[in-house]
Image (spheres, coloured by chain):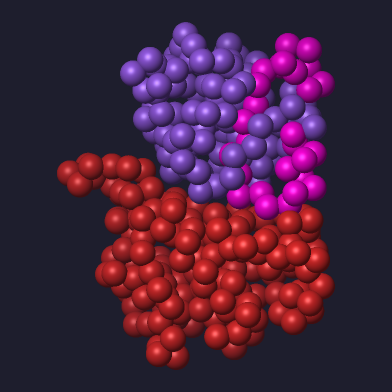
Amino acid sequence: MAINVLIVDDSGVMRSMILKSMRLSGLQLGDVHQAANGKEGLDALNEHWIDLVVADINMPVMNGEEMIDEMLQNPALKDIPVVVVSTEGSKTRVVRLQDKGAKFIHKPFTPEAIRDTVKEMLGEEVCDDVAN
Amino acid sequence: MSQIDSIVASTAVETMEKLAFLFSFPDEERKEAFPGPAIAGKVGFNGLFSGSLALRMTSSVLPELAVNMLGLDDEEETNQELHLDAFKEMLNVICGNLLPALAGEEAEFSIDAPEVITADDSDDVIEFQKAASIVRLMLEDGHCDLIFFMDGKTPEDILASAPEQIAAP
């Protein structure tokens, strides 16, 4: 089952790393959209069907936590799974994000960490059998 | 090497290795900034305390940094924009891992967008004399200096008040 993904990070290199890691890990990807901040991320969510959001926290214009808060206020977006990929080291903030329904992966990350987290959220069918 | 220097060094060494397969070790014999050409960047932060982390690195390492971070094949070309983006992201990740290592995992920080100070040499854009910590690293094909600044507080204030410093990654 291919999933449409939105990757939100102000670093183009990091967005590429996340995408490559997702492909390497065997996740079946459909349409992939990218955004450089939370505001752009919300615009993409309003324009495209997205099954999964992968987002950083520290971004200009609108940070990742603000974007998640906006998603939770929108009935059309509130149930979209969110994985936060961040250097965030504050346990307080990580727990707060998790209480909002997000999963958390710490940078630097491995492809396996992304795969296992996405499988946990969306189920085994999002992965290629070969990669499993 | 002071405790804060040790934390900065171990965080940077491990982050560069995990993020970009750049292997480094403290160059304790070198007491001065390495000769250029070098790229220098800075990222600010605020929270429990405010300050910034600067990173100065041999310019010729940039292509390898970008290729490794992106997992590119040797024959794939990169460009200056990718090099600078990779450098800034590495600085961002080092800073993000350093702050909880210094202040404990309960402290919250907001990290600014990293910026390049200079991409073409000059070791006088960084005010080394105001630094709380200076760590000099040797890379396989160059050098890397990390310069940590804190506003107001001293390193001893931070390390003494941190309830539980997490191990550097």
Residue B82 drawn at (x, y percent): 38, 48
Q: Residue at x 79, y 47 (%)?
A: A92
| Residue B64 visible in the picture | yes
Viewer-side residue, B82 vs B16: B16
Residue B29 drawn at (x, y percent): 40, 90
Figure quadrant of residue A49:
top right
Q: Residue furthest left?
A: B75
Residue A117 drawn at (x, y percent): 57, 29
- Above or below, B70 relative to B1: above
**Segment colored magenta:** A72-98
Q: Which quadrant would the C terminus of chain A be assigned to in this image?
A: top left
Viewer-side residue, A5 vs A43: A5
| Residue B42 visible in the picture | no
Residue B129 painted magenta: no
Q: Residue at x 50, y 65 (%)?
A: B12
Letter of the chain in purple:
A
- Above or below, A79 relative to B52: above
Figure quadrant of residue B75:
top left
Q: How many marks can you see?
A: 0
Residue A42 drawn at (x, y percent): 66, 25
Give left or right: position of A92 versus A127: right
Q: Residue at x 49, y 28 (%)?
A: A115
Residue A80 painted magenta: yes
Figure quadrant of residue A29:
top left
Q: Residue furthest front?
A: A132
Q: Tell me what hue chain B is rendered in.
A: red
- Above or below, A123 relative to A26: above
Q: Residue at x 71, y 79 (%)?
A: B155
